[in-house]
Image (tube, helix red, strand yellow):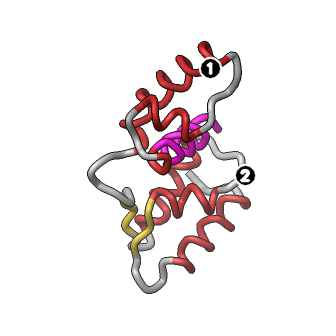
Amino acid sequence: MALRPALRLVLQELLSRSAQSRVLTLDDVAGAIGTVAASADDVESLFAALEGEGRTISDADVSHSPKADLAVVLAAARALAAEMGARPTPSAIAGRAGLSVERVRAALRFATIMAR
């Protein structure tokens, strides 16, 4: 699948950013995608293009993944929203879920990317 022009720009940025290390984290990819509308197929195509250019994509912390944390984060967020009647903060979600704020944010970024 060919990349759309907006995603070709993202690809070029990521290739430039990883010219020395040849390694990118999921956070690097999410940050580069930013507000560009991207479907799950677009993200898969971007990963394939990066890997085709010899890049390795890894989770910043291999002991956990945002995808695995997402169910716990969503359950905690829903429970807190029902109790508080408002949208909970990442730090409140982290406290309820027993995760760090950074892991909560990573899971929420993952959900945002996958929802595009």
> Which amino acid does the dot numbered 2 rest on?
Thr
Q: Is residue 101 left or right of residue 3?
A: left
Q: Residue furthest left?
A: 63
Q: Main secondary structure of the magenta part?
A: helix
Q: Residues in magenta?
A: 104-116
Q: Residue furthest bottom?
A: 20
Looking at marks 2 and 1 on the same chain, the residue that comes earlier in the sequence is marked by: 2
Residue name at image x 40 percent, y 36 percent: 69
What is the crowding at mark 1: few (fewer than 14 residues within 10 Å), some, or many (at least 20)?
A: some
Q: Position of residue 47 (x, y in %)?
A: 47, 57
Instruction: Please say if 30 is above or below 20.
Output: above
Given residues 102 and 30, the one toward you in this image is 102
Q: Is residue 109 magenta?
A: yes
Q: Is residue 29 left or right of residue 51?
A: right
Residue name at image x 52 percent, y 63 percent: 28
Q: Position of residue 36 (x, y in %)?
A: 72, 52
Residue name at image x 65 percent, y 18 percent: 84
Q: Position of residue 89 (x, y in %)?
A: 62, 36
Name the residue beneath numbered marker 2: 35
Q: How many marks?
A: 2
Instruction: Please say if 12 is above or below 102.
Output: below
Cα gap from disc 2 to disc 1, whole angstroms: 26 Å
Q: Which mark is residue 81?
A: 1
Q: Position of residue 86 (x, y in %)?
A: 70, 22
> Which amino acid does the dot numbered 1 rest on?
Ala
Q: Is residue 41 magenta?
A: no
Residue 53 location, quadrant: bottom left
Q: Secondary structure at mark 1?
A: helix
Q: Residue furthest top?
A: 82
The reply to whether the C-beta atoms of the residues labelled 2 and 1 are less than 8 Å apart is no
